[in-house]
Image (cartoon, grey):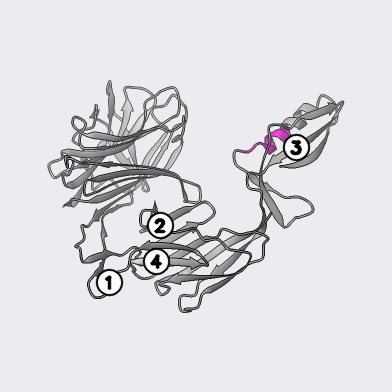
Amino acid sequence: MIEIPVFLVAESRQDLPAKIRELADWLSTDEPKPLILPHEPDKYYLAKVSEETNLEEFENTGRADIIFVCNDPHAYSDEVQLYAFTPSDPEPLEVLNSGGAEAFPRLHFEFTGSTTEFAIFCGDDFLYFGRPAQVDSETPTTKRTKVLDDDCSSVASYTSGVSVDGGVITGSLISTGTAIRAGDYGAGTGWHGPAGIRDLGQQIQDFTIQIEVGFKAGYPYQVGRLELYLLDINNNIIGKMAIKDSSGKVDSPVMEARAGNAATGKFFVNYSGPAGHWRQFNGPMRLTRIGNRWEFSASRRDQNGNLYSTYSKSFIDTTNQYNQKLAKIQVHFGQSASLPTISTVYLDHIGVWNERTLLSSEVPYIFEAGDILDIDCSTGEIIKTSNGYQETFYHQMDPASTFIRLRKGLNEISVHPNDVISDSFIEFRERWL
């Protein structure tokens, strides 16, 4: 806790409340903000104002001891230390931490080649992804192949939808040139709106589907839904994922995922989280089926394009009831009766991958040329970017891994293999107690 005395001077007693409110508004933040103290202008703390702060008023002046709470007790350097990896140099990268405490870096790797394993070592800490391929008995191979990469710049490849859950298909789909949305919802007494089908050109047993979604209400009373259906070769519904708000009172959307159809399927995701958790949503929604395991995930995307607040849930189809092959997808935008619809609802990217079933002698590439790996050792976030799509990337990490810590003084960091990366770096802020 850091206590700072503050004095306010207004032109008159009547003007003092306005000065107090101005200061209070400036100090009020949802997240910790940098606090710079005069005697250390090159360092900052991450702080929020305590609610215990009280103000004493005297005529046209006021005095307060503002208490800042720092959940992280460290002071941070205002300068970021940056070190680049040199792929052609087999020697460890030497990184100097001149701070007074351990630092937790951010690591960025851009891949120029394929590998079934990748590791970062620093002292006793290491991060290891994938597994090695035995040179005499195993073959490295690509496990995931892209089937559809739709940038949503047109709806020309979409045909008329066939059916939607609990509603009717009306209205039309349009593209703004960068996103697909409802041109109009038509009319109906229940759920209604446009739907369109995109044929994948092949049937897929194991798959991953990811859609980039915007779902942002202008007012709490607006309702609506955005759904993506999985269809077989005969247009039968074999699964679904959706974001939906049907409350009409509170801006609190729900994430849904289902294996199978509405009549006999299994809803394994119906998640709203705390009130308003998914409000003003922008980010990816993903549905994967590999073998009899279904998995759904959704993440928010910040203004810099980074993912956060990821939610995921899986379901094991023990009876192998929901194993029909995927052949098509259907997108649907829905309105409930004549109620006001969500102001901003769109899709701006749709990707579908074939998740190949490998032979016992095949080992999948964990990273391939063009992939990007970002690791934030201070937050524990690991993000892989492949062909423009981002995903949290913990499932391919060795569970014995530990996030990298930079001890005080000189640290040596090794990357293996180092001949498959370029334009890669480590950055961090020095810290003091």
Over which residues does the magenta segment extend?
22-29
Q: Judge left or right: residue 370 versus residue 51.
A: left
Disc nearer the start of the sequence (4/3): 3
Disc nearer the start of the sequence (2/4): 4
Residue sitting at the far top: 189
Q: Which mark is residue 118?
A: 4
**Foreground of the two, 268 or 301:** 268
Q: Which x, y percent locates residue 45?
A: 68, 49
Disc nearer the start of the sequence (1/4): 4
Task: Name the mark nearer the viewer: 4 or 3.
Answer: 4
Name the residue tied to disc 2: 384
Q: Which x, y percent locates residue 416?
A: 42, 71
Q: Judge left or right: residue 356 versus residue 251.
A: left
Task: Name the mark nearer the viewer: 2 or 1.
Answer: 1
Question: Mark 3 and mark 1: span between their CA atoms?
Answer: 62 Å
Residue 26 colored in magenta in the image: yes
Q: Secondary structure at mark 1?
A: loop
Whether pointer 4 and pointer 3 mark residues with C-beta atoms closer than 8 Å, the reply is: no
Name the residue tied to disc 1: 134
Q: Which mark is residue 66?
A: 3
Residue 82 position (above or below residue 349):
below
What residue lies at 68% left-to-right and 35% top-to-bottom?
50
Q: Secondary structure at mark 2?
A: strand
Question: Mark 4 and mark 3: span between their CA atoms?
Answer: 48 Å
Task: Name the mark nearer the viewer: 3 or 1.
Answer: 1
Residue 426 colored in magenta in the image: no
**Amino acid type, label 3:** Ile
Q: Residues within 10 Å of mark 2 (few under 14, many from 20)?
A: some
What residue lies at 36% left-to-right and 66% top-to-bottom?
117
Q: Which x, y percent locates residue 10?
A: 83, 32
**Amino acid type, label 2:** Lys
**Amino acid type, label 1:** Gln
